[in-house]
Amino acid sequence: MSFTVLADVVLVLHFAVVLFVAGGMLAIALGVKLGWIWVHGWLFRLTHVAAVGIITLQAWLGQHCPLTILEGWLRTQAGEQSFYEVSFVQYWLETIIYFQAPLWVFAIGYTLFGLLVILAWWRFPPKLLQSKKLLTNGEDDARNNNFSP
């Protein structure tokens, strides 16, 4: 497998992480309102808050994402240096997920987003979803607006 293909795989993985972090918060907000039980699950919520926490900490420490560093190294190993030598996948995904701004802008943005995730955690805490009966009761609670803001 070539370095370019590996770099594209890392970029797709990076895009999936971005979707999980941003989409996860959207799913929590919508799920609470629409009665989606899975958005209250511990595994989903812990994974989400941990990802946001790690990203925020990295930004405050002035560190770039390890996936960004790995992708850059792989592209260097592949001999890619010019914008015009990038793959289709690389061009479009980098256009979508990479913004040009100082690290402090990202640190503030990630912190505000992290605070939003913590607020959602506090306002709509995760629940243990162990049985079908609990799922049914949770759906009843959601219909009765016990989970709505």
Image: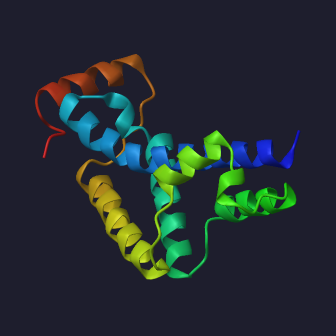
The N terminus: image quadrant: top right
Q: Position of residue 138 (x, y in %)?
A: 27, 28
In this rendering, the answer to whether 68 lies above or below 94 is below
Looking at the image, which is closer to me, 8 or 57? 8
Left or right: 86 as drawn, with respect to 76:
left
Q: Quadrant of residue 142?
A: top left
Here the colouring is: rainbow
In this rendering, the answer to whether 135 lies above or below 113 is above
In this rendering, the answer to whether 54 lies above or below 44 is below
Q: Residue shown at 31%/43% (left/top)?
A: 26
Q: Position of residue 116 (x, y in %)?
A: 29, 61
Q: Quadrant of residue 40?
A: top left
Q: Residue shown at 54%/45% (left/top)?
A: 92
Q: Position of residue 95 (x, y in %)?
A: 50, 52
Q: Residue shown at 47%/60% (left/top)?
A: 52
Left or right: 6 as drawn, with respect to 144:
right
In this rendering, the answer to whether 49 lies above or below 93 is below
Residue 46 shows up from this direction: no
Q: Position of residue 82 (x, y in %)?
A: 71, 61
Looking at the image, which is closer to me, 107 or 11? 11
Residue 60 shows up from this direction: yes
Residue that lies at the very extreme toward the front in this rendered image: 84
Looking at the image, which is closer to me, 12 or 34? 12
Left or right: 73 as drawn, with respect to 14:
right
